[in-house]
Image (cartoon, rainbow, N blue to C red):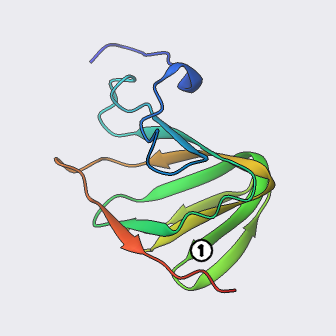
Amino acid sequence: MSRYALVNLLDLDDSVAGRLDGLEGRFGRSKLESRDLGISHWRYAPNLQVPGGHRHREQEEAYIVVAGSGRILIDDDVIELRQWDVVRLAPETVRAFAAGPDGMELIAIGGPKPEGGDGEQVPVSWPD
């Protein structure tokens, strides 16, 4: 591992292209050569509500809203998000996101990633 690494997240490939119209995701962990930190950039189109969520077995995460606004579904609770809000989630907590009328951009930060990953996709039900 080198002494440092510099990456512009917007220079990375959109790793989720084609999975859901209006969603972009760029992952920096490998490009940063990081052993313990996962850093990713997420961009949600205006009013995009992601129909599924995820959780982890071991990895704690935090999300920082860097632009726009929206909502996060945390298990069965819906929380409003605005620019510069930070949400920390325990691994087992199910989470999903919905963007507001101006869209939303998040930076996600994750802890050490177990070999093979530990994320699990989970269906969610957004309240009306």
Residue 54, image x, y percentages: 41, 66
Residue at image mark 1:
73
Residue 37 figure quarter? top left
Q: Is residue 56 left or right of residue 18?
A: left
Label 1 sits on a secondary structure element that is strand
**Amino acid type indicated by mark 1:** Leu
Q: Residues within 10 Å of mark 1 (few under 14, many from 20)?
A: many
The vertical placement of 8 against 23, above or below, is above
Residue at point 28%, 67% (across, down): 57
Q: Nearer the viewer, residue 124 or 9?
A: 124
Residue 50, image x, y percentages: 56, 63
Count all numbered tags in the image, as a single digit.
1
- Quadrant where the N terminus is found in the figure: top left
Q: Is residue 60 left or right of residue 109?
A: left
Residue at point 60%, 80% (across, down): 126
Residue at point 28%, 48% (across, down): 113
Q: Residue furthest right?
A: 101
Q: Is residue 92 visible?
A: no
Q: Nearer the viewer, residue 110 or 75?
A: 75
- Quadrant where the C terminus is found in the figure: bottom right
Residue 82, image x, y percentages: 80, 58
Residue 41, image x, y percentages: 56, 38
Q: Nearer the viewer, residue 75 or 35?
A: 75
Q: Residue furthest left?
A: 115
The vertical placement of 124 against 86, above or below, is below
Residue 85 figure quarter? bottom right
Residue at point 47%, 68% (across, down): 52
The vertical placement of 96 against 6, above or below, is below
Q: Is residue 23 visible?
A: yes
